Image (tube, rainbow, N blue to C red):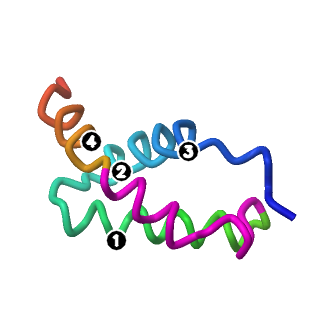
Amino acid sequence: MENLSFNEQEFFEEVVARALEEGVANKEAFDEYVDQAVREHERWGELHDDNDLDGIVTQVQARWGEYQEILDNKTI
């Protein structure tokens, strides 16, 4: 049974907020961070195998350009 409460946009926004806090600043670190976040949500029971976890990872990792733009425009 698919977890219908999962929202990719909300998940991306969470990843962005947390990655900015952690200082993630390159593609490799972003990709790793996305993978860790998906696995964390899986451990918490918020995502399941039938959610296509690898697909979620791939889709969110593909949004690196959006994250980079946010990172570049971040003011300290």
Determine which residue is flagged by label 3: 8
Q: Quadrant of the N terminus?
A: bottom right
Q: Is residue 2 above or below residue 64?
A: below
Range of magenta residues: 46-62
Q: Which numbered disc, 3 or 2, marks the residue closer to the eye?
A: 3
Whichever of labels 1 and 4 marks the residue nearer the N terminus, that label is 1
Asked where in the image residue 70 lies, by quadrant, the reply is top left
Q: Name the residue type under label 4.
A: Tyr
Q: Residue 29 or 10: which is nearer the viewer?
A: 10
Q: How many residues crowd around disc 3 within 10 Å: few (fewer than 14), some, or many (20 or more)?
A: few
How far is disc 3 from disc 1 in space, using C-alphas? 17 Å
Q: How many residues crowd around disc 2 within 10 Å: few (fewer than 14), some, or many (20 or more)?
A: some
Question: In the image, is residue 61 part of the stretch drawn in magenta?
Answer: yes
Q: Position of residue 72 (x, y in %)?
A: 12, 33
Whichever of labels 4 and 2 marks the residue nearer the N terminus, that label is 2
How far is disc 3 from disc 4 in space, using C-alphas? 14 Å
Q: Quadrant of the C terminus?
A: top left
Residue 35 appears left or right of 30 = right
Q: How many residues crowd around disc 4 within 10 Å: few (fewer than 14), some, or many (20 or more)?
A: many
Q: Secondary structure at mark 1?
A: helix
Q: Position of residue 32 (x, y in %)?
A: 34, 71
Q: Is residue 67 above or below residue 44?
A: above
Q: Is residue 55 above or below residue 69?
A: below
Q: Secondary structure at mark 4?
A: helix
How far is disc 3 from disc 2 in space, using C-alphas? 16 Å
